[in-house]
Amino acid sequence: MSTSSPILNQYQIIASLSSQILAEARLSHWDPLTSLARQYQLAVEALRHMNQLSSEDRAARQPLLAQILDDDARLRNLAAPELKRLGALLGQTKGQRSVSRACGAHS
């Protein structure tokens, strides 16, 4: 297995970042996720500009992809309640603004 190929190294970086993101989410540390998500995005973008995988590299990346996808699914499950809470807060704020505008228009 050629674990030293640049493209596999990039997959390893992405897998590491996805694990870090999941760990922070499990601890409800939402603020550090912004920085980690940006690093993740940049790592994925860098991967898009790399050469094609060899068949050996394709086989070697399978466990990394499985980990990345598993982390992503777990993160979505953890984030869903927080996103729902934020959505409710935004909805309340929007409703309060509408009421304020309506009351202001009738003053």
Image: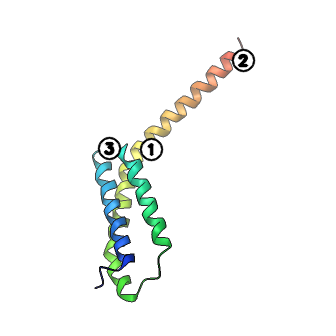
> Is label 2 in a helix, a strand or a loop?
helix
Q: Percent x, y for residue 93?
A: 54, 29
Question: Disc 1 marks which residue?
Answer: 83
Quadrant where the image shows the C terminus: top right
| Within-10-Å neighbours for mark 2: few <14, some 14–19, many 20+ | few
Residue count near mark 3 (Cα–Cα under 10 Å), binned few <14, some 14–19, many ≥20: few
Q: CA distance from mark 2 to mark 3?
A: 42 Å
Circle 2: residue type = Ala
| Label pair 2/3, CB-CB below 8 angstroms | no
Q: Amino acid at mark 3?
A: His
| Camera-nearest label, 1 or 3 | 3
Q: Are marks 1 and 3 in contact (CB under 8 Å)?
A: no
Q: What residue is shown at x 30% (from left), y 56% (from top)?
A: 20
Q: Secondary structure at mark 3?
A: loop
Q: Identify which residue is drawn at 48% across, 33% down.
A: 89
Alpha carbon separation for disc pair 1 and 3: 14 Å
Q: Nearer the viewer, residue 63 or 82?
A: 63
Residue type at numbered disc 1: Leu
- Percent x, y of residue 67: 32, 68
Residue 26: horizontal and vertical position, in percent? 29, 49
- 58 or 70, which lies in front? 58
Residue 5 lies in what quarter of the image?
A: bottom left
View extreme (top): residue: 107
Give me the disc on residue 105. Answer: 2
Q: Quadrant of residue 69?
A: bottom left
Task: Work out whether 85 lies above or below 14.
Answer: above
Q: Point out residue 4 in the picture as x, y percentages from the top left corner.
A: 30, 79
Above or below, comparing residue 75 to residue 56 in the picture: above
Q: Residues within 10 Å of mark 1 (few under 14, many from 20)?
A: few
**The disc label shown at residue 102, or none:** none
The residue at which mark 3 appears reads as 29
